[in-house]
Image (cartoon, rainbow, N blue to C red):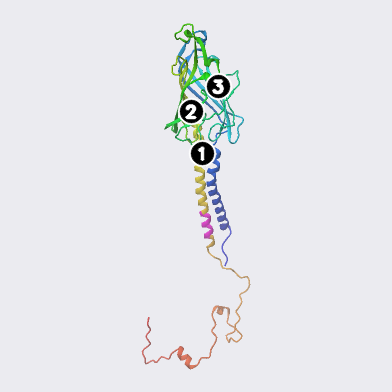
Amino acid sequence: MAERSGPSRTLACILVGLGAFLLAAALLIPTYTVDKLKKTPLDLEVTTIATGNGDVLDAKALAAGKAVVDTNVPLVAQRYVTVVDPSNADDITVQAGQTVRRTDKKGDTGLLTASVDTVTLDRVSSMPVADGTSTIQTEPDKPAKVVKDRDGLQYKFPFDAEQKAYPYFDLNSRETQDVNFVEETEINGMKVYHYNQKVAPVDLSTVVASPTNKLSLPAATWGVEGGDAPVTMSRWYANERDLWVDPVTGVIVKGQEKLYQYYAREADKPEVTVLKATLPFDEDTIAYQVGQAKDGADKLSLFGRTVPIAAGILGLISLIGGIYLGTRGGNGPKTPATNAGPATTPVAPANDPNQGYDSQDAATEMIPQQDWTESDRTEVFPVIDPNQDPPTTRL
């Protein structure tokens, strides 16, 4: 008898192999692909714009001999971040050009602050790399200055951000302080983590040796007592920074800074305001950042959950189907084997008087003829007296 094989057994093998492949893929895809996606992209190019109104010192008036502070001035802070060399599979070097200007004046007359920051970051943690690039340029006619031992986040949080404090580097003060977790909230339907950092007043003349960071002018020019007597004041900087971060991708969805720069002889006694304003991201920037965060989160979800689950389900179905089909094919109906030659008649023993029986008797067991005695017959077939009652059979 021969087993049925052919297409069904081949299909069973294919299904089992496919099922095993899909199950293996379901396990490997999250491990391999998600790790690749949890890196800051090398084609990063982001522009953020923050707007608001504030108080601004009129530089021309100060140079003319009188400190004048304009109020309710329209302001815009713009930052353009792109990728430069060296960047590779593990590290990324970003360059951020940042300006703050008053929009009621044109050209350079409206420029209040400008800087170019270049730093090499780890693509996963978003923290500065110890042996990477770290420079800041604040004056266009002077080379950028190296910032040693830089630490802390700046332009992005790590993937899978947590509800805890992170070190954050402040560009103006050149110092790292904690940015503290405040709350979990929503922006445009997206869950975000809110962080806050307070930067205490810093004497900018100790940070950058710029002529405008320490000035000696007549007291009358400053608007304080003393007439023409020279009074030396330092330029101080303080800030309160709020950041709303997508915890999945680390994208800063919204940012806001409460800038305060002023001239004073003592940190806790401001005398002449230089810049005082609250500047949050505008709505277009927030919408763009939300879109970037959602795109990144969707990719992570696709390869971290959706594809592995689908591959696992399909693999399991294929594996079970292949095993079932293979088992069913092995125990299926049998087909009788056929002999090509003619049927043969068994040969009876030479001493058998029944020689010559036909092929239909071949399956019948032949009992050799025996010579029985009368006693043997009686033992096997007892003689029944017709006048006696028949024997009783016990059940």
Mark carried by residue 300:
1
**In the shown orientation, is residue 268 left or right of residue 343?**
left
Q: Mark 2 or mark 1, which has the lower sequence index?
A: 2
Please state which amino acid type lies under the numbered disc 1.
Leu
Residues at marks 2 and 1, CA–CA distance in whole angstroms: 31 Å
Q: CA distance from mark 3 to mark 2?
A: 20 Å
Residue 194 location in percent, x, y?
A: 44, 30
Q: Is residue 16 shown in magenta?
A: no
Give the tally of numbered discs.
3
- Asked whether residue 178 is in view, the answer is yes
Of labels 2 and 1, the one closer to you: 2
Q: Are marks 3 and 2 in contact (CB under 8 Å)?
A: no
Q: Earlier in the sequence, mark 3 or mark 1?
A: 3
Contact (CB < 8 A) between labels 2 and 1? no
CB atoms of marks 3 and 1 within 8 Å: no
Magenta residues span: 320-328
Q: How busy is the neighbourhood of tag 2: few (under 14 within 10 Å), some, or many (20 plus)? A: some
Q: Is residue 336 above or below residue 6?
A: below
- Three-letter amino acid code of the residue under disc 3: Ser
Q: Front-most of 89 and 139?
A: 139
Element under label 3?
strand
Picture residue at 48% right of the left edge, 26% below the top: 284
Task: Please name the residue that numbered disc 2 is placed on.
Answer: 177
